[in-house]
Image: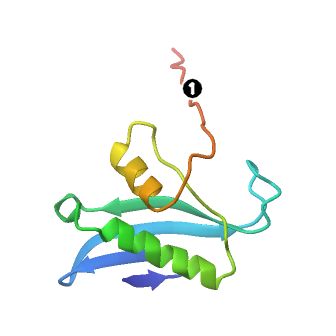
């Protein structure tokens, strides 16, 4: 794993395999009583490396990094139809916190 501030990059045999991008902030609008938190914005593993545990290892690495920064609340988002991500996040100990509904209108 390579960690560059809030970016974790995974390599397999010297080839790019995936990344996790996150940030640290305080008092999220959706739970303002939380003093300090991490928010994982993106977890991506290239298709040819999926199923090898790379996302799990990157998230474990990210959680350890956040602990060192005295962050003990972490949020992560995914679409409701992303079964692989939902399975991974539940396996990692994340629990559903809330839901957001996106609306769309095409204006002629």
- Residue 44 in the image, given as x and y percentages of width and height: 35, 61
Q: Is there any visible trace of residue 6 in the rendered image?
A: no
In which quadrant of the rendered view does residue 56 lie? bottom left
Q: Is residue 2 above or below residue 37?
A: below
On screen, residue 49 versus residue 66, left or right, reads left
By what rule are the colours in the image chosen? rainbow
Q: Is there any visible trace of residue 68 in the rendered image?
A: yes
On screen, residue 16 versus residue 2, left or right, reads left
Of residues 87 and 49, which is closer to you in this image?
Answer: 87
- Residue 52 in the image, given as x and y percentages of width and height: 23, 67
Residue at image coords 29%, 68%: 53
Q: To which residue does mark 1 refer?
A: 103
Residue at image coords 54%, 24%: 104
Residue at image coords 20%, 84%: 14
On screen, residue 107 versus residue 46, left or right, reads right
Residue at image coords 53%, 74%: 63
- Residue 85 in the image, given as x and y percentages of width and height: 39, 51
Mark 1 residue element:
loop
């Amino acid at each position: 794993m390579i960690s560059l501030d809030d970016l974790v990059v995974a390599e397999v045999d010297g080839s790019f395999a995936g990344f996790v991008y996150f940030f640290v902030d305080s008092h999220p609008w959706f739970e303002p009583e939380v003093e300090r938190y991490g928010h994982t914005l993106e977890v991506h593993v290239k298709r040819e490396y999926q199923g090898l545990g790379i996302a799990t290892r990157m998230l474990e690495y990210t959680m350890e990094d956040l602990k060192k920064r005295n962050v003990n609340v972490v949020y992560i988002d995914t679409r409701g139809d992303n079964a692989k991500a939902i399975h991974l996040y539940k396996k990692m100990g994340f629990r559903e916190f809330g839901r957001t509904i996106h609306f769309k209108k095409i204006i002629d």
